[in-house]
Image (tube, rainbow, N blue to C red):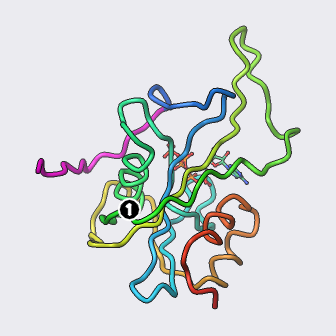
């Protein structure tokens, strides 16, 4: 089997971003649980550094499957390596439609709406240095701590609720 090459540079930009047929930005992410399934690993958001989010990001055109994108994001944002054990399905952007500002620059209207594809992951390795370790903090949360921190992120709460985390 080919060894997996993991870059120390995180991908940037949206040139290779994949969209659904209805124009939603496809986003892949992971729910990485502790071995006893009582904790989930989260990382700080770059947009709001006082907030933690699940490791996730755009599914790109050179990635064959959303699982590949989820594993890349897990590595780039959280420095974790593992195996995807199950799909948690598709979660629509739950923000009210009035928040989506159309792009009226003469081109097609592309709403910055997202469609989330989350996967549960069995952790194999947690590295101390990873591509975004200089700009993201990583931290383990119990279910109730995670729910509290994800208050304004219903789509991420939904992903966590679909996982096999023990809800305490
Ligand atoms: N975003 C914010 N709140 C949202 C909500 N309630 N529902 C759906 N989407 C929501 O911000 C990432 C994106 O999530 C923003 O574009 C925002 O509009 C949208 P974040 O989740 O706070 O994390 P981040 O700032 O760390 O995000 P990045 O990793 O920089 O970007 P992406 O996760 O979009 O992916 P990327 O790695 O492909 O750039």
Q: Quadrant of residue 165?
A: bottom right
> Across the whole image, how many numbered discs are drawn on residues?
1
Q: Position of residue 161 (x, y in %)?
A: 65, 72
Q: Position of residue 118 (x, y in %)?
A: 53, 57
Residue 43 to residue 142: above or below: above
Residue 152 to residue 102: above or below: below
Residue 15 to residue 97: above or below: above
In the image, what residue occupies the spot 45% across and 71% down? 32
Per the image, is 118 magenta? no
Q: Residue furthest right?
A: 98
Q: Position of residue 108 (x, y in %)?
A: 70, 14
In the image, what residue occupies the spot 36% across and 31% down? 62
Q: Which quarter of the figure is the C terminus placed in? A: bottom right
Per the image, is 12 magenta? yes
In the image, what residue occupies the spot 74% across and 62% down? 154
In the image, what residue occupies the spot 36% across and 37% down? 64
Task: Categorize mark 1 by other alpha carbons within 10 Å: few (<14), some (14-19), many (20+).
Answer: some
Q: Majority secondary structure of the magenta segment?
A: loop
Magenta highlight range? 1-13
Q: Position of residue 72 (x, y in %)?
A: 36, 50
The residue singled out by tag 1 in the image is 84
Helix or strand or loop: what does disc 1 sit on? strand
Q: Is residue 60 left or right of residue 26?
A: left
Q: Quadrant of residue 45?
A: bottom right
Q: Is residue 111 left or right of residue 56?
A: right
Instruction: Give whichever of 103, 69 is nearer the camera.
Output: 69
Q: Residue furthest top?
A: 106
Dot 1 beta carbon under 8 Å from ligand 1: no
Instruction: Give whichever of 145, 69 is nearer the camera.
Output: 69
């Amino acid at each position: 089997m080919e060894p997996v090459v993991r870059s120390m540079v995180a991908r940037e930009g949206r040139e290779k971003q994949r969209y659904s047929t209805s124009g939603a930005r496809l986003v892949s992410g992971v729910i990485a649980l502790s071995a006893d399934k009582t904790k989930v690993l989260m990382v700080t958001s770059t947009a709001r550094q006082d907030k933690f989010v699940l490791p996730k990001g755009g599914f790109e055109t050179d990635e064959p499957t959303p699982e590949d994108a989820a594993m890349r994001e897990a590595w780039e944002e959280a420095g974790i390596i593992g195996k995807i054990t199950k799909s948690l399905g598709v979660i629509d952007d739950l923000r009210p439609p009035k928040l989506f500002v159309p792009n009226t620059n003469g081109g097609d209207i592309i709403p910055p709406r997202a469609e989330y594809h989350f996967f549960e992951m069995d952790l194999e390795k947690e590295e101390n240095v990873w591509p975004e370790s200089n700009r993201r903090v990583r931290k383990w949360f119990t279910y109730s701590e995670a729910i509290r921190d994800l208050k304004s992120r219903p789509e991420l709460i939904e992903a966590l609720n679909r996982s096999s985390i023990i809800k305490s």
